[in-house]
Image (cartoon, grey):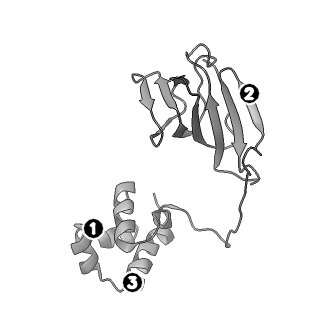
Amino acid sequence: MRRPIVLAKIREIRKSKGLTLEQLSQASGLSVSQLSKIENGKARLTFDTALMLSGLLKVPVTAFLSSPTSAPVARRSITRAGGGIVHNTPGMKFEVLCSDFREKRNVFWRVVVTAKTVEEAGGWRHHPGEEFLFVLEGTLEIHTEHYEPVRLKPGDSILFDANMPHSYVSQGKRDAVVLMSNTVPADGEPPAVVTHR
């Protein structure tokens, strides 16, 4: 359940834009009653509804979905091109990006996939959390336990539960290069780069 203080922010932003519940209701297609319940924490705020409201109110969706912090946070981390720590695994090279934060919710990697088969990639891997991939170069073929292999080209992306066994291979003459993000498990330890089944 969302914390009421987070939900109350919808009302705060709506009022700052000079909108009444009735006006937001007409623009969103949600009833006044439903909007009022969302604002007061009596109805669940779904991601799709938050996304739609953020578009109408012209604020980032994270304004509704993130928990409030007790003090302003002003951290940043920069990794210069080629400056990340590199981990080499069978068929893949992982470069850790922006890893300076002591407490992380995500780990970011630039991954070069050279493997042409699942075997060359070291077989199947799985780990806690979610995995996000955005293809920068080449063609990436993703194998997962519950789905048929799918090919992604530059500009394509995918998000999946990383506990599902998965493997990556590069298709074509060029290596596949991807931006990867993993959620960090609750114990705060980054996910293992390779966990074979």
Residue 158 percent coordinates (x, y)? 46, 39
Chain-order first, disc 3 or disc 1: 3
Residue closest to the eye, 127 or 33:
127
**How far apart are the alpha carbons under marks 2 and 3?**
52 Å
Contact between labelled residues 1 and 2, with CB atoms less than 8 Å apart: no
Q: Quadrant of residue 147?
A: top left
Q: Nearer the viewer, mark 2 or mark 1?
A: 2
Dot 2 crowding, Cα within 10 Å, few <14, some 14–19, many 20+: few
Above or below: residue 64 compared with residue 122 = below
- Amino acid type assigned to the residue bearing label 1 in the image: Gln
Contact between labelled residues 3 and 2, with CB atoms less than 8 Å apart: no
Q: Badge 2 is on which residue?
A: 88
Label 3: which secondary element:
helix
Above or below: residue 113 compared with residue 96 = above
Q: Nearer the viewer, mark 2 or mark 3?
A: 2
The residue at the point 59 percent across, 28 percent down is 175
Pick the quarter of the image with the C terminus.
top right
Dot 3 crowding, Cα within 10 Å, few <14, some 14–19, many 20+: few
In the image, taking residue 76 as reference, residue 180 lies left or right, namely left
- Amino acid type assigned to the residue bearing label 3 in the image: Lys
The residue at the point 78 percent across, 40 percent down is 85
In the image, taking residue 18 as reference, residue 86 lies left or right, namely right
Q: Badge 3 is on which residue?
A: 15
Chain-order first, disc 2 or disc 1: 1
